[in-house]
Amino acid sequence: MTNEEKMLAGKLYDPEDASLQEQRTKAHRLCQEYNTLFDDQTDKRRQIIQELIPNQGKDVFFQGPIFFDYGSNTQIGDHFYANFNLTVLDTCPVILGDNEFLGPNITLATPMHALLPAERNLHEVAGKQVAFEYGKPLRIENNCWLGSNVVVNGGVTIGAGSVIGSGSVVTRDIPAGVLAVGNPCRVLRPITEADRLELKKELW
């Protein structure tokens, strides 16, 4: 297996592989270019996002600034919105569904490292200094809202229609249709018909 194949499969791989470095450099450059553009430079912004994230649906919007490690390992559905400062470390697949709403300062992080320092630090393999890592994919199903400053770790699936409260750190799967908050993130309660805006008279 190549290092890229190992990376995407969640196996130990060498992140300093030349091909992976080239892909990251391209993605980082595209992100930097996007981050220098103004909101009304829509055509140029769209071109960059299409090159950065080839696998995307319609009506995908990033307020920016953004940061992707690869972009090509991220899949986005239709009607996606991300506010300021989205970071996606997509060493493994990141799958984002339809009608997603991401608040500011969201981090989606798939990379994993050894817990033991001796395994995490640089060591020599075949005459080369290597710090192996691995990853775990993450998935956010359709119709989710992540509040500001949420971190989603690799290996996690957030079920359809769920809301993750601001500042939460999601370290385990979240079922569909719930409000979940905290660090680590835990289910607070189901989302029900009682949550309809039309019932909140103070808003009208």
Image: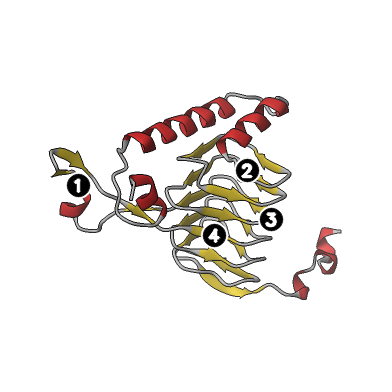
Amino acid bearing label 3: Asp
Judging by the rendered image, the residue that carries numbered circle 2 is: 83
Describe the element under mark 2 as helix, strand or loop. loop
Q: CA distance from mark 2 to mark 3?
A: 16 Å
Judging by the rendered image, the residue that carries numbered circle 1 is: 121
- Classed neighbour count for the residue bearing mark 3: other residues with Cα under 10 Å, few (<14), some (14–19), many (≥20): many
* Closer to viewer: mark 2 or mark 4: 4
Describe the element under mark 1 as helix, strand or loop. loop
Q: Looking at the image, is mark 3 or mark 1 earlier in the sequence?
A: 3
Q: Looking at the image, is mark 2 or mark 1 earlier in the sequence?
A: 2
Q: Is residue 197 left or right of residue 89?
A: right
x and y, in percent, of residue 3 in the image: 33, 46
Asked if the residues shown at circle 2 and circle 1 are in contact, with their CB atoms under 8 angstroms apart, the answer is no
Amino acid bearing label 2: Asn
Judging by the rendered image, the residue that carries numbered circle 4 is: 139
Q: Looking at the image, is mark 4 or mark 1 earlier in the sequence?
A: 1
- Classed neighbour count for the residue bearing mark 1: other residues with Cα under 10 Å, few (<14), some (14–19), many (≥20): few
Image quadrant occupied by the C terminus: bottom right
Give the quadrant of residue 146.
bottom right
The residue at 72%/29% (across/down) is: 42
The residue at 50%/47% (across/down) is: 73
Judging by the rendered image, the residue that carries numbered circle 3 is: 98
